Structures are given as C-alpha cells and as structure tokens.
Image: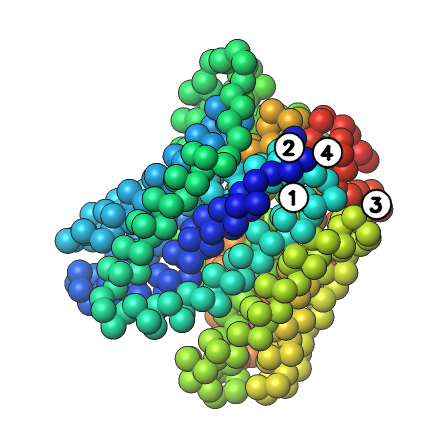
Amino acid sequence: MSPNPPRALLPLLFVGVLMGALDLAIVGPALPAIKADLAMDDRQASVLFNAYVLLQMIGTPLLAKLSDRSGTRLAYMVAIGFFALGSLVVVVAYDPVTLYIGRALQGFGGGGILPVAAAVIAITVEPERRGPALGTLGAVFGLAFLLGPVLGGLLLPYGWHWLFLINLPISAVLGFGALRLLPSAPQPQRQPLDVAGIIALSVLLAALVYGLSVLDVQALGSSLAQWPTALSLLLVIVLVPVFWILEKRAVDPIVRPGLVASRPVAIAATISAGAGAIQSGAGFYPALAVSAIGVSASTAAWMLLPGVVLATIAAPVAGRLVNVLGVRTLILGGMALVVLSLLIYGLAPMSIPVFIVAGMIGSGGMASVMGAPLRIVVLDHCEPRERGSAQGLLSNFTSVGRLVGAAAVGAIAASFGGGGPGYQRAFVALSVLGLALAVLALVLRPAVKARAGAGVGTRQG
C-alpha cells in the first residue's frame, strides 16, 4: 500500500464512477427521444434496460477478478474501454439491435468501474483515509442522479446522441490517467483461468435477470407456469450449487467459497441486497407524489432533489465516522433513519413538505449504510489477492436486491389497488425489511473499523 498516492488518483477514480453512474441517470430523460428516433415500443425499451443490467452484473465479477489477477490498472482500463466502445456503438446505432449491443457493452464495462475503484482505494489509501474515500464513491452516485436530469436537459435539444458521445473524450482522459496513475501488481505466478466458473456464473446471472424481468408477482402461479419463466428460475436453482462446487475445485476461483462463507461478509452481502431492494423503492416515490399529492411528474422528480443533495453530503461524512463509531453503529443508525423515512411515506398524510422531509431522512440514512461501512466490512475479511472480487461480490448482491425490490414494490402496490394507498402499503412492507436488516446488523462486531490490517485475511466475529 502506498502511503502517499498521487493527488490526481482519487479524482480519476471518482470521475470514472461518476461517468458510469451518469449513464444510468441520463437514460431515463433520453428514453422518449430514443424510442421516437428508432421507432421502439415499450417492450423494446425494456430489453434495452435488461441488456445493460445483465451485462453489468456479468462484467462486475469478471472485471473485478481481472483486477486481482492482472492488476487494477489493466482492469480499470479494460472497463473504461468497454464503456467507451459501447458509447460509440450507441451513438452510431441505426436500429434497436445495434442499440442493445451498445448498451450491453456499456453495461459490461460499467460493471467493473466501481469495484475496481474500491480495490484501488484499498491498495493505495491508508486506513484512516479509506472510509472517507469509499464514502465519497457512494456520494458520486447521488451526484450523478442530481446532474443527470440537468445534463440531459442541456444536451437533449442537440440530439440524444450527445448524451453518449460525451463519454468518449472523458473515457480517453480516464484511460490515459489510469495508465499513468493506477498501480499494476499482477500475480507473480499465473494461475489457470476459472473458465468453467465464468461460464456457470454468466449463465446463472442471465437466467436470474431474465427470470426476474418476466416474472409477474401479481399472478405468481400462472407466471411460474409459463415455460420461459420456469426454465430460467430452475436454471438458477440448479446452477447455484453447481457454481459453488466448481469454485471449490478451481485453483483460482472467480469467487472464493471461503469469502462467501465468512459470516461478516455474508451479513454485509445480505444487508447490501436488502438495502438495494429498499433503494429500488425510491424509484416509486415520484409516483406516490403524483397520486397522493397531485403534483406533476416533473415536480415530483424535483421534490427528490433535497434528499439527493443530502445523500451526496452524508456519504463522505459517514465514511469519516467509520473510524470513530465503527460500521455497526453507522449501519444501525442509517437503517433507523431509512425505516423512519419509509414509515412516513407509508403512514403519514402526504403533502409536499412531508414528502421532502421523508426523502431527506431516508437519503441520509441510506448514505450511511451503502457508502463506506459495508465495503469496509468486506475489505476487513478478504485476502489481499481478492480485494476486487470481494467488492464485485458486494456490488452484485446490491444489483440483485434492486431487481427483486422493484418487482416486489410494483406487485404490492398493485395488489392494494395501486395509486397512493398501494404505494404506501409497499413502503410499509419495505420498512419491515429495513427493521430485519437492522437486527441482522447487530450480529456484526461493535467496532469494526478500517484497520491497517484490513484485507490480510483476518477474521472477526
């Protein structure tokens, strides 16, 4: 670990994460223009979303593993390269299929940017500064959703292609900076690539994403009776133990079974998945405002702005508090705020002030959970040679949670008649999940902090 990383290193990482996050935030405002230009229907737009999500989830563990095997410099450059290539393909797309390919390439590259950046921080930043740095990475996502609509509004009048074309010069600068600044420390002895594990994991994730995307939770029985849904979910059930067996036999597994078997890592991954599910509920907040308060969709989106700003501030602050309070206290405090926010959304009579205050409470709480604390738990319980893989594992659990949460919130809201009352029932259900996550966090050691020995295979309760 370098005690004095180059001053430009952290900005380089943050800009990369911001670029990947912005591409998620920008697509929403650009989607109507894209659909009109390429004559796409809603089903094709759904495929566009699923292509990005699927390849993002596949790219996350593969590029994270590349960073462990061949160094973070190469992995970061490959991730940026795929993202830039995908952006170029999107810009020149003349039909929906070409657009799918571009978004898939973007997703694959984007999936590796965050875990590789977190691994770089673990390698180069001293323990007392690691929390704030990881917290700032979390804040970047809040900043992206703040800047996304603004940037979209500025560039859309010139054509939706500019939203993706802007990625090319930024990617060039990031690639050059990575070549100069990022550490490259490949394993001294090359080990066999876990080809069987890569194939099994890719098929497993593809089946999981497809199965969740076509599953109709409101008509669960009839949906499961459809052979595409049943086959994809059956593949998931079969491939989970197959993947586990393959990884136990592999010389250099994509995900070391001992890492997943570590109780603190398993707890952190579970909390990350649950928090991802709760995060997906935030996507329905504007719908609640439209239904319960009667504001326009654009006004409802702007009402989320104070919460986004607070999250951007709270994430690095929480990172600084890791070494003072410990991760368990931060997670418990953060989840308490998230639960309070959800209960306000779910039980209180809605008005504009109530909506904004609830959003600020929940955003601040989620920033305390999803920024530095969970990533530090994982870093404290992984080997130095698997820092990237460990961070990728956490990212993928979050992604799975978001997919499941979005489906569950929609189904619960619909089962209670939709509209304001339906969404409020869904948020009450999410508050129960938040309470369960808080109880689970109690199992963590009271004072797990970023330590000088983090990432050296140490084990704590």
Query: Residue visible at 34% across and 39% down?
Result: 82
Residue 454 - label: 4
Q: Position of residue 449 (x, y in %)?
A: 78, 43
**Tag nearer the camera, 4 or 2:** 2
Query: Is the residue 260 above or below the residue 50 in the image?
Result: above
Q: Secondary structure at mark 4?
A: loop
Query: Residue visible at 42% across and 58% down?
Result: 22
Pointer 2: what residue?
A: 2
**Tag nearer the camera, 3 or 2:** 2
Identify the image quadrant of residue 438. bottom right
Q: Report crowding for label 3: few under 14, some 14 to 19, many 20 or more residues within 10 A (C-alpha).
A: some
Q: Secondary structure at mark 3?
A: loop
Pointer 1: what residue?
A: 375
Query: Residue visible at 79% across and 48% down?
Result: 323
Pointer 3: what residue?
A: 447
**Tag nearer the camera, 1 or 2:** 2
Which residue is outermost to the top?
189
Which residue is outermost to the left?
94
Identify the image quadrant of residue 339. bottom right
Which circle's residue, 3 or 1, is located before the other in the chain?
1
**Tag nearer the camera, 1 or 4:** 4
In terms of depth relative to the viewer, which is nearer, 262 or 423? Answer: 262
Q: CA distance from mark 1 to mark 4?
A: 11 Å
Q: Position of residue 251 (x, y in %)?
A: 54, 14
Locate the N terminus by quadrant. Answer: top right
Q: Position of residue 200 (x, y in %)?
A: 44, 27
The reply, left or right, for residue 257 in relation to residue 252 is right
Q: Position of residue 72 (x, y in %)?
A: 50, 32
Query: Residue visible at 84% across and 46% down?
Result: 446
Amino acid type assigned to the residue bearing label 4 in the image: Ala
Q: Report crowding for label 4: few under 14, some 14 to 19, many 20 or more residues within 10 A (C-alpha).
A: many
